[in-house]
Image (cartoon, rainbow, N blue to C red):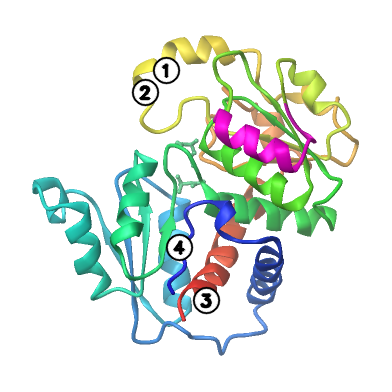
Amino acid sequence: MKRDFLSINDLNSSELQSLFKRATELKSGKDRSSCPLIGRSVGLFFEKPSTRTRVSFEVGVYQLGGQPIYLTPKEIQLNRGESIADTARVLSRYLSAIVLRTFKHSTIEDFASFADVPVINGLSDIHHPCQALADLMTILEKKGRLSGIKLAYIGDGNNVVNSLMESSAKTGMELVISCPEGYDPNQNIYKQCRDINNKIEIVRDPREAANMADVLYTDVWISMGQESEADHKRQQLRGHQLNSSLLQCAKKDAIVMHCLPAHRGEEITDDVMDSKASVVFDQAENRLHTEKALLEFLIS
Ligand code: CP
Ligand code: NVA
């Protein structure tokens, strides 16, 4: 039966561990013979812009021997009334997997329910699980473990933090989220994850979150699709900036993470983004290695 990757919950803990092991092998460059996608094509259907997700998947598919096909709503018949179900059925006859980036998470779920091939969530309004895979691999590389690590997330309770909550539930990582009232992460995901790992909590004071943290993480205040509420949101989130005074609250050897793109001077300051503590570009690189391991795992 085909496997989808719509959220972190689609992999169990031991599958996650194997995936990080394989991604590390692929990153080391020692295994250049693995071309499981020779003669196969992977579709990328994106409703929103992307630098990292698009390019890392395109390069990853190519490095595994396959052909990536990038599609936007303008280029296929979905926008002209062809149903999601029919699109999914047809594309499944040509492609070995499909990566989707959509506004609504339900679009990806619908697509996956009609597709006969693995569907991968390349970001929706609720989840960003491919990002979380790279985040976990990066923390493992830098800190050597996940369980017992304290990650402080500062900012908007968005898709990225929803996937981090699922990641914490799976790995035993402590996750303290600091966001203003009204900008909490998804409450259902929060409750489900907290039932599994009670070290996931939401606070209002960024300094409390950052206190003795091993990892400080932030993301944009205005996610794609939220532009109409940007001015109000910026005001509400002003006190939740990842800056040098917050970095001082964390452990001395704390690392700084951001899924990127960053809005420098808004959710993160230049000095922190460019500091020795920042691992944001390693994190971006690890998108490629984790996605290759994921493609190998899902496409048999
Ligand atoms: N982090 C991330 O998903 O970046 P893109 O929007 O550039 O793909
Ligand atoms: N939360 C951001 C992540 C971008 C990678 C967004 O959805 O736009």
At label 3, counting other C-alpha atoms closer than 10 Å, the crowd grade (few under 14, some 14-19, many 20 or more) is some
Report which residue position mark 3 lands on.
Answer: 296
Q: Position of residue 144 (x, y in %)?
A: 84, 58
- Return the x and y of residue 90 as percentages of the image width and height: 19, 68
Residue 59 in the image: x percent, y percent? 44, 68
Type of the residue with mark 1: Ala
Q: Residue at x 40, y 56 (%)?
A: 54
Q: Tag on residue 10?
A: none
In the picture of the structure, the residue carrying the numbered disc 4 is 4
* Tag nearer the camera, 4 or 2: 4
Mark 1 or 4, nearer chain start: 4
Can you tell which quarter of the image residue 239 is in? Answer: top right
- Secondary structure mostly seen in magenta is helix
In the image, taking residue 17 as reference, residue 88 lies left or right, namely left
Magenta region: 186-201
Three-letter amino acid code at the position of disc 2: Glu
> Which residue is painted at 42% across and 75% down in the image?
62
Q: Which residue is mark 2?
A: 227
Q: What is the distance, in whole Å, between disc 4 and disc 2 at their CAs? A: 30 Å
